[in-house]
Amino acid sequence: MLGDSLLVSSSTLFCQALAAATSLLLRFALSPAQMGVWQALKLFLGYANYANLGISKGATRELSVALGRGDGASAYRGLNLAFTVNTLSSLVYAAALAAWGLSLAISSGRLWTNPWALGLLALAIFVVIQRHVTFLITILRCRQQFALTARLSLIEALLTLALVGAATWLAGLNGLYGGTLAVLLASWFYLRQRGGCSLAWAWNFPEIRRLIGLGGPILLSGAAATLFQSLDKLMILASMSDREYQLGCYSLALLVGGQLFGFANMLSIVMGPRYSELFGRCGRRTEVARLAARASELQAAALALPSGLALVAVAPLLGRLLPDYRPGVAPAMWLIPGAVAMGLSLPANQYLVAVYRERSVLASLLAACGLAALANHLALTAGHGLVGVALATSFAYLVYLVLMLAISLWPELSAPERRRYLGSLAVALIPTWSVALLVHLIWPAAGWRSSLLKALAVTAAWALTASYGWLHGGWKQAWRQGGRS
């Protein structure tokens, strides 16, 4: 398990670096309006994951259980059913996207020069291939073939940087569509050659209905989480007249926030399985909650440095590197605390899943979605623009963190443990963020030299607090406890 965790974490970190480089290259090659179109199309592509009503998740969950009891043959029948429903549902979704794209092309009288029409037609092809690739990857993870999925992630990241970057630089949005299709086809071919999983058409309506019943709740939670984290983009698209340009500028904030959340998610992959194992071993929620609380402390310490550096250096330098996207710098600064809050909510989320309280996660996400929609609507109608969207989104993320803690860890921790939890998060975050805010106010210049000096000051503050927590705050013991668990 430790080897798998190190492999997944190291490959994910490398892929994040490549993804960041790709994101910068795309923004050099595309205007903010073009980037806004691509951001919107990616939303529609992500929603395709929920077209199969959860049968894929139900079938792969059955596979994990069947492999545990040594009866994988029966589970593969369910995978064939899921493959059939997955393919048919993705074709229906693709047909709807293609019809939409064709209607836009007909109404505008142009296809190749209409980014929305051509993009929707390209998306119709992407959906079918991506759904198949994603399903095969999920099966491989259930079979614990992490080395294969890690290699695929690296190949995809390298191809995306090389092919998609070059195609976009040469042909703009049309090149981006072509490069993305090439990467998806390469992933599909790789899995067909190396995945070792042969799926066939099958149909059994009672069994399909049962698998949808198993995967439906998991799917709903995933759909709610996706909606929650895309509401700011949807509100920009729905409420602003120059929606493509505004969303393109806001993509700078999404780039920074997405990298921070991805880093937090990478850390959670290491600890997540341990919560289920600990609960299965001892059967006591309190023990799992204590471990999750300690993991949150370590996660806060790890997030403090990149978030502090993002505040003083990354966001301002991106504004200098990408002057056309400069309206997205201020929203990026306000979105950083929200991204950290979403990262800190992951241990609480994983705790609830480990102790079989998935419905509590869904209820919290639905409540947070309503709050985020209302806050974004108020910010936009009041004329606060992208900064208002970022503020409203960060506020909703912070409320979601508090809500998750209130229904998960907080009831299980004693009063001293609660004080320790809050104190540890304060020690991990407040000194680093205070220094970041101080040097930003004292030295507002955004040049390379000033950004380097501010980054060094933030790093020094983080190193002092992290060293204190490691030596005197029990973080060293918590890390060892997590390894033993």
Image (tube, helix red, strand yellow):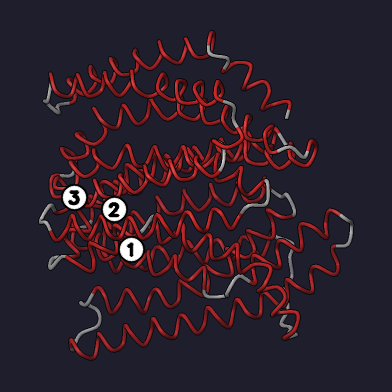
Q: Which numbered disc, 1 or 2, marks the residue that appears first in the sequence?
A: 2
Q: Secondary structure at mark 2?
A: helix
Residue 304 is drawn in which quadrant?
A: top left
Task: Please say if 381 is above or below 126.
Answer: above
Query: Which residue is labeled 1 in the image?
Result: 176
Residue 26: where, in percent of width, then height?
29, 53
Left or right: 339, with 215 as reference point: left
Q: Secondary structure at mark 1?
A: helix
Residue 240: where, in percent of width, then height?
15, 65
Q: Are marks 1 and 2 in contact (CB under 8 Å)?
A: yes
The N terminus, quarter of image: top right
Left or right: 34, with 75 as reference point: left
Query: Which residue is labeled 2 in the image?
Result: 26
The residue that appears at 64% across and 65% down in the rendered structure is 57
Q: Which numbered disc, 1 or 3, marks the residue that appears first in the sequence?
A: 1
Query: Which residue is labeled 3 in the image?
Result: 388
